[in-house]
Each structure stands twice: as C-alpha cells, then as structure tokens.
Amino acid sequence: MKRIAILTSGGDAPGMNAAVRAVTRKAIHDGMEVYGINYGYAGLVAGDIRKLEIADVGDIIQRGGTFLYSARYPEFATQEGQLKGIEQLKKFGIEGLVVIGGDGSYHGAMALTKHGYPAVGIPGTIDNDIPGTDYTIGFDTAINTVLDAVDKIRDTATSHVRTFVIEVMGRNAGDIAMWAGLAGGADVIVVPEKEYDMKDVAAKITEGRERGKKHCLIMLAEGVMPGHEFAEKLSEYGDFHERVSVLGHVVRGGSPTAKDRVLASKFGWHAVELLKEGRGGLCVGVRNNDIVASDIIEILEQGKHQPDMSLYTINKEISL
Amino acid sequence: MKRIAILTSGGDAPGMNAAVRAVTRKAIHDGMEVYGINYGYAGLVAGDIRKLEIADVGDIIQRGGTFLYSARYPEFATQEGQLKGIEQLKKFGIEGLVVIGGDGSYHGAMALTKHGYPAVGIPGTIDNDIPGTDYTIGFDTAINTVLDAVDKIRDTATSHVRTFVIEVMGRNAGDIAMWAGLAGGADVIVVPEKEYDMKDVAAKITEGRERGKKHCLIMLAEGVMPGHEFAEKLSEYGDFHERVSVLGHVVRGGSPTAKDRVLASKFGWHAVELLKEGRGGLCVGVRNNDIVASDIIEILEQGKHQPDMSLYTINKEISL
Amino acid sequence: MKRIAILTSGGDAPGMNAAVRAVTRKAIHDGMEVYGINYGYAGLVAGDIRKLEIADVGDIIQRGGTFLYSARYPEFATQEGQLKGIEQLKKFGIEGLVVIGGDGSYHGAMALTKHGYPAVGIPGTIDNDIPGTDYTIGFDTAINTVLDAVDKIRDTATSHVRTFVIEVMGRNAGDIAMWAGLAGGADVIVVPEKEYDMKDVAAKITEGRERGKKHCLIMLAEGVMPGHEFAEKLSEYGDFHERVSVLGHVVRGGSPTAKDRVLASKFGWHAVELLKEGRGGLCVGVRNNDIVASDIIEILEQGKHQPDMSLYTINKEISL
Amino acid sequence: MKRIAILTSGGDAPGMNAAVRAVTRKAIHDGMEVYGINYGYAGLVAGDIRKLEIADVGDIIQRGGTFLYSARYPEFATQEGQLKGIEQLKKFGIEGLVVIGGDGSYHGAMALTKHGYPAVGIPGTIDNDIPGTDYTIGFDTAINTVLDAVDKIRDTATSHVRTFVIEVMGRNAGDIAMWAGLAGGADVIVVPEKEYDMKDVAAKITEGRERGKKHCLIMLAEGVMPGHEFAEKLSEYGDFHERVSVLGHVVRGGSPTAKDRVLASKFGWHAVELLKEGRGGLCVGVRNNDIVASDIIEILEQGKHQPDMSLYTINKEISL
C-alpha cells in the first residue's frame, strides 16, 4: 500500500493521539502517505479528510483526547453508510484504514472488511473491555486518574470517619473498579462479574470500625447499579455515614501515562506493518506482553474480554 | 499562657495539617505545651484530648485532610455544650484554644469568647467564604484540583465538540467558580453574585461554534442551581451537546499547594503569637498580603466576604 | 491605538501563554488588532511578526512555555537594534508593544520608551525577582513544581535516614527557596538575603537526629553556592549521609497553576487597558492584591524586589 | 509457618509499602503472625524487629518510600552477618522471611537460603533490572515521574529551540530511558544495550531543525556516560543549543502508580502463599502477566534481565 488513512471513533481515550502519531510517522518512515479523517465514521462518510505530515503529529503525544475528533455515527451500521465511506476512501486513493476506538469502532472496521476493504482496528477505550487484547489504550491512564481521586477522597473519609461509595465507569466490565480498588485500598469492590451480599458489605464495614478503622471505601462499577442506589441500600443495614462520589467525564481526559503512550506507539507501529503487507480485517492487541493481530470478525463474534479476577480475590484477603 | 489546645472543625480542607503543625511547633518553640483535640467540638466536650509533641506533627505538612479528625456537632451551639467544653479545657489546664475551620467553627470560638475563654480562629475551608480574610486555607488547593479536572474535561469536550456544564462547590460564594473559570478558560461563569441570562449563554455558545470553537465550558457554582437543572434549561435554547460534570468530594482532599501550606504556617504561627500575649476572641486572616487579627464577634456579626469580582469581568471580555 | 503587538522574552515561564491569550482577546474585544512577534526581540528586529486571531490563542491557557518562542538577544541593548525594532513595528503599523519577561525584557521595553515608543512590560519569570510587583507570572507554578520534588525526596530521605541538600533556582533572590522551603517542611533554608553559619546547620541536624527525626532537608538558593559545594562544607562538621539534588530546567516548564493563570490574565487585560489609553513606558504588577502600573524607568532604576522575609523567620521557629 | 517477617533493602522504590501491606494482611488473613524488620539487613542483624498488626499498614498503600526504612549493609555479605541474622529470626520465633529489594537484597536472601533458612524475594527497584520478572515494583512510577519531567522540559526546549540531554537512572539497564524515551517523544535514545554513533545523533537533530522542529530531546541512560559528557561530545558536531538535565533522586520517590500498587499487592500476596506452604529459596516475579516463582539461586547465577528492545526500534522509526 502507498496511502493509508486513520480515524478515531467512539469515546475519546488518553493515548489516542500517541497512536495517531505512531501510525503517521511509521507510515511516512516506510514511504507511505497518511490521511487523517476528522470526526470518526461521520467524517469518513462526509469526506472530512486531509493529508497528515510529520509536523502535524508533533507535540501531541502528551495530550489527552483526540486531535482528529470523534463522533457517534449510528448511520455507519447501515450498508449505505459503509459503501459511502469506501467510496470516499477510494476517491482519495486511500488503500487501507486504521480505526482506533472501542467496540462500535471495531464493528465499523468489520463491516469494511466484509465489503473487502482492508481495515485494521486498534483498541482505544478507557474501559478495557475489548476482546483480543489484555489492555486497551487509555485504561492505564483512567485507573490512575481514578486512583488520584480515591487518594483525595481517603483524606476526607478519614478526617470525618465516613464510608464513601465511589462509582466508576464500567457497564459490563469491572476492570476499572478492580484495578483502582485494589490499588486504592478499597474495603469492598463491587463489579458486574461477581455477586455481592449487602449484608456482608455492612458486616465488613462494622468490623473495620470496631477495629478503629477511620475510612471505608467501596469501589462500585456503574454496571451494577448507580452509586446513590447502592448507598441507600447499604443504609438499610446501619448508619455508615455514607457519601457518594461519581467519577464521570474527568476520567476520560488527561495526559496519557507512560504505559498508555508506549502501548499506543506499539499498536500504531504494528497496524502500519500489517497494512504495509496488505493485510486487513485484523485488530491488534497485546497478549502476554506480545503484540498480536487477530481476525476482527472472529474477535467480535466469538471473542470475550477476560478481566483479571485475581485482583478481586487478592483484594478480598488483604483489605482487612 | 503555658498550655494551649487546637482543634479542627467543619469540612476538612487541605492545609489544616500544616496549620496544626505550625501551631504545635511554634508553641513548643516558645516554651508552651500543646494539646490536640480529636473530632472538633465533639471531642472537646467528650474530652478526647492528648498532648502533642514535635514528632506528632512530623511528616504531615504535605497531607490532605486533618489528622485531628473533624465532626459536625450542632450541640455546641447550646450553652450547655459550650460550658462543658470549657470545663474539659480547664480540667487539662489548657488556657487558650486555636480553632481551625469555617463559619460554624468560628461561631463556636465566638461562644467561648463570650464566656470569657480565649479562643483564636484560623480560616480553613475550601470555599474561601469567611469574612476577615482574603484567602482561606484550602482554597488554593481546591481551585487547582478543579482546574486539573477542567483541563481533563476540555480534552473530551474538544474531541467530541461538546458543551460541558461543570458544577463546583460554592453555596453562597462564587470564588471557586470564578478562579477556576478564569484559569480554566471557561466560556461562561455562573455565580450567585451575578445575574445571568440563559439566552445570552446560548448566544455565546452559538457564536463560538460558528467561529469554529470545538469545546464550550460553563463553570457553575452549586449555589445558583444544580448542574443538571442548568443543562436542561440551556437545552431549551438549542442542542449544544451538553454534558454535566459534578466535581464533588474529590475537591476537598489532596496534598495542599505551596500557597496553602505557607498560608497555613503563617496563620498557625500568628495564632500562637496572639495567645502567647494572652489575646483571645480573635480570628487571623490575610489582608493585602499582611497577616491580620480581627475581633471574632465583629467579623461574624458585621463582616462580609468580598470576592474578587474583577475575575468575572475579565473572563467575560477574554473568553471569546 | 488600533494595532498592538506582543512578544515574550528571556527564560520561559508557565503562564506566559495565558498572558498572551489575555492580551490578544482583550484587544480584539476592544476593537484592536494584535500581532504576535516570534523569538522575542530577535524576532522583532528580524520582522518575524504575524497577526493573531481569537483561535490562535485557543487551547493554550493550560500550556507551559511560550508559543511565541523566546530567545536571548543581547544585540537589543544597542541603539541600532532598538531603532531597527521600532522600524519593524512601524512597518506593520503597530502602535504599541506588550513585552512579557524578566529583567532583561524590561530593559528592552525601557529602551523603546526612551525612544518615544509606547511599551508596557508584564513580569514573567519563575524567579519572582522583578521590582514593581509582589508576584511574577510563573513563580507560583515553579514553587509547586519544586514542592512536588521535595515531597518525593522526603520519601527517600526518610527511608534512608539521609540529609538532602536541594539546590533551587535563585541567583539573587531567595523567594523560591523560602516559599518551597517553608511549604516543604525544610529544616534549614539558605538564601542570599541571610547570613548562615554552617556550625548551626550541623547542630540543627544533629539535634533532629537525636530526637529521632529521619529526614533532613536543606533548601538552598543557587545564588549562595552550588549544592555540591554546600554538602562538602557541611560534611566537615560530621557525617550526615548527605545527598545533593539539583532541580534545574524541570522547574521552568509545566502547566501553570490557577494562580499563575489568573495573574497572567489580569496582567494581560490591564496591559491592553493601558495601551488603549495611549499609555506606555509602564510595567504592570500586583501590589497587595491590586493590579498596578508603574513607570518602567523608575522601577528599573530605583525599584528593588522585596522578598517576604517573614517566611524565613517562621520556618526557623517551626522547623524543629 | 506461623510467624514470618519482612524487610525492605537497597534503594527505596514506590510500591514497597504496598507490598509490605499485602504481605502483612495476607499473612494475618491466613492466620499467621507478621514481624517488620527496620533498616533492612542491618536491622535484622541488630534485632530491630517488631510485630505488625493490621492497622500498622493502614494508610500506607499510597505512600512512596518504605516505612520499614532501608539501609546499605555490606556486612551481610559475610557468613558471620548471615548467621547472626538467622539467630535473631530464631530468637523471635520467626520461620520465614520476605525480602523486598533489588539485586543486593536478593543476594542476602540467597545466602539465607543456602544456610537452610526459607526466604522469598520480591523485586523492588525503580531500575527494572532484576532477572526473573518482566517488571519490578517502582518501575512504572519511575518512568511516569521521568515522563512528567520530560513533558515539562519539552515546554522549555520548544520555547527556546533547544536540544536537551536528559540523563536518567540505569547503570546497566536502559529500561527507564527506553520507556520514558518512547513515551516522551524523544528524538534519540541512548542506552547501554545499543551502540550509538554521535555523528548520526547530530545528523538527526540537524534534519529535524531543517524541517522546522523546535525541540530536540535526547534520553540518555547514566550507564552510557554522564549527561554533561555526552553534551560536550555532541557539541563537537555543531551548535545544537544543548542543555543538560539530570533527573536524580526525585525519580525514586512519589506516590506509586496503580500498576505498581497492584503488582506490589500481587507479589506480597504470592510471597505469603509460598511461605505458607513452607517454600523458600524463591523469588516472585511477573512473566507474561502471570505471577511466577523462580529458584533464587538459579535466577541470580544464570538469570539475565531482558529489556524490551522493540521500544528502541519503534522509537527509531517514529521519532522523525
């Protein structure tokens, strides 16, 4: 291939810019041309496409968000939208596409693949819930942002001897709650992957209180229930001076961590290697520290994200 | 005086520990003994009091919260509670009291003063809404914590071309909203001190959009109305892709900034100087860079916090 | 005036971008045109000048450094250079100039003033050593960056029971050392403004050690002597397991704090107000929380920066 | 086993406290008693040993350094020292020992093993240079601290169009330089594992300058040569306006990242599992995301740390 394009889609995640930078520079290094598509699939269909040079991706590795912008675009689920997108790509002479994003973005890439157009997916989402990879771009930054908040909340929880229910993102996956929970010294972690018994939660808090523990932190994935609802149910078992903290959009932004920037750079580099060899219909990922490429159709149809449940078990035993 | 005590009361604020450290060490340096009272006025009445040595306040200058703990204790508004408190202080041979906190804490100190017991107040609250001082301990840290969140939110707002309503603390005072708003490049600041017209807000966003501006940030003090309510009212004037972010308890904690630690150290040092001279019934503050002491009764009965409204005006003119 | 220009000069300081943004937008708000000059006085003489629009200063309020670049340019001390600069300004129809920087930058502005060209100085330097203002842009960020390092060094100092000599910037002014020293809980602060006795320093460390203190931090302004030299001299009085940490260029960069962004916005806004009224030959500053304008010739010839020495005294008494 | 002990040794690393917490609480959870040894092997030989309860390790997961203190103690390399240590352990009825630290610490653990005393090593050092594990405790925090400094330096480098040589830790291993270099967008990475040609370095800078690149960052592992020496040699090939920044002790401290806290918790948990089964003579590590235990003698005698050299290659191709 001589000319490829790149877009970011879905919710923004820290490290997306680092991935766009890596794709752009690796491609130029290898003698290819690179085009940036604004606003994800919406911009693809609309033809909001421009050539990227080395300097266009300078000084962005450290910035959160995505300088290619992102947008929701349900219309790309239709065959009409997909063919329109391919038409635009061909108009610009673009032979392959890199898509950075989450589940929805992968579906777009799969659709292009089924139409015979070479697309490669890069997992970029703070939720870490994409099959085919151990880690997604943005996850490491997100858990450190949550952790920073937890450390601050602990100050107040300790000062006032309170119980905090901290609601974090994670509709289907408890990764953020488990990582930030174990790292933040949470007393209880509540995630979609595991049943919980409110009576046990209450008992654990009481036990800690009796031993003189000042703060109590409950890390709750939003997928289980909203924080306020959880606090209300908990209050049926006693007065735990509970407060609720919902960590929302703040967790999406911020300068990416070292790990996210390195991961993004590796993913971007490998995506170009694949397209260079003319290979599409794939998504890159990291498995046991190795960068791998999986069939995107297989991943979406049969893959399943496997969170590291050992964190849950360990936290249970050391959060005395 | 030969023996004084210190307590923290009301909501915790970053820098309270630095103030307790300064009081303790300055007093010991000047040949006095210092006692720490746990849990604010509740601990005072209950006699939860212990001697503090130099090492007890070591390694706490950088920590958020208050290691003396805090508690709400409405009972201290009664004469009975106040006399019980004075009784406890006398039992321990304590001749003067330093109280760190906000409005409620000052009222406790004023009550003691009216009973003839020497108390000195130190303004400690993130809201900056205490009369008698230009700045309170914790305010500088709080606005930087808010700013950090705003910078993160801007990443996402830009990436998705969205309008964010950011609700920050401030029931009666718009200080946090104005400082963090001007510093964060907010398009609109909405505070209790100023009327606003939703039509103008909508017009400003539209104007920015038309000029190609990607993000729009509205900084809202909670005292005006909740963020969600504001967003809903705004949406009556058009579709601004608005999202709401409520920055809650996270803003209370965290390691204090340099300014807050320096201010806390100065306040603590001066409070001891006053008690050493046998002076009570006062509260310390900073006025035009000078540390001052005001009559606590006067301050509470006639004082009024004056926010720096020039920030509002300047932001209006430079947030194009 | 209808057309003004702005340049940044000397060492970069966090908040310079916020000041450029404020100048640009305030001027446009007031119906003026604004030109940005790259690379300070060097770019002025070379005519490296371009028009700035609202969007050019978007998304820069949070960024360290200066997007107008800076450069050392001793040639501007000559009459020839100055006249060349004025020629360039006139060529572009520019009627007034805002200069952001430190001492050297002010001298350039003074020279223009003496030639009858209206220039206004804004104090921007991390050292806080400019007369005519209590605080300079960048100082608050710098002391917080130093403080962050001190907090990290304390971890290691405590873990290994060591004495750290921390050398910070400040050739003639001890502001950084005093603020970060008091805020960081330094045991000893050594600044150009005060004599010190190495024997006393050694005695203080020994005293702390005997009381069980683990870490010892000495905050040293570079103007007194290099950190390694200080450590060597100290070691003549005993083995204090001393280590040296030199905080260099890292302290110049970084995202500006809330205070620096607010100060920069105020300064920029006021500088435009002055030029709008046709007033030049001035420098803005903050005095007792008020924004003031002083005669730049007077300030440079008779002004003297007055550091807040109360920090030194207070630290001496509470760093037991 | 019914009673185990734990010590930290060598340079402190962020996350050591999280590991001590995990060991202590996991052991108590499993019905064992835990003793903390102060000052590493020095405290072991001196008998500076105390029982740890649940609350002793409360509120430390977020703190840098090691609350058990560390110390260099070459005497433990002698048989006499080792036997004295075992004698102390037996005196306290301690049946197994967990050692957290780097290479030197492992040698102590190996010696105990050879004397028949069960010891388990946990890799804790910021350098990531321990065989038997992909990552050590503290490495992730250290590269993020370096990265934070690099982002700040970039501000100044860009503003002044300068070349910065950033010297980071790493005597034999280039891990820190490679990770922080790729993540920080370094133009050139110089590590002990790879030859470099100063002429190529100079050519690369020139190339970037000609393309309009403002900043140039060279990430140098201290093991290659000191930063000042490198800058001097570079200057023989042209005037690159080079500055040197040495990131020293600051990189050792700070609150651990999420990854380091999780890793430390896992390591601590597993070390106790091993001792519970009566197994010693091992060191824990992480291999391809799995926690593993290796024979400590084998690891020290034949193991070799394998840095991820793909980072070097990728950076070379994308740092245009």
Image: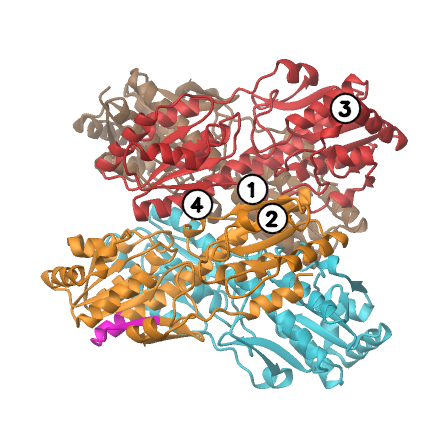
Chain colours: A brown, B cyan, C orange, D red
Q: Measure the alpha-carbon separation of dots 4 and 3.
A: 53 Å
Quarter holding residue C25: bottom left
Mark 4 crowd level (few <14, some 14–19, many ≥20, 10 Å Cα): many
Q: Amino acid at mark 4?
A: Gly
- Which quarter of the image is occupied by the N terminus of chain D? top right
Q: Measure the alpha-carbon separation of dots 2 and 4.
A: 36 Å
Which residue is at the front of the view, B227 or D114?
A: D114
Side of C88 relative to B268 (left or right):
left
User: In this orientation, does residue B268 appear?
Assistant: yes
Question: In this picture, which residue range is highlighted in magenta?
Answer: C272-284
Q: Measure the alpha-carbon separation of dots 2 and 1.
A: 10 Å
Numbered mark located on residue C67 in the image: none
Q: Position of residue A196 (x, y in %)?
A: 68, 38
- Which quarter of the image is occupied by the C terminus of chain D? top left
In the rendered image, which residue does mark 2 sit on?
Answer: C164
Label 2 or label 1, whichever lies nearer to me, is 2
* Chain bearing mark 4: A
Which residue is at the front of the view, A238 or B258?
A: B258
Say if C103 sits above or below D26 in the image: below
Q: Secondary structure at mark 1?
A: helix
Identity of the residue drawn at 33% across and 31% down:
D319
* Chain bearing mark 2: C
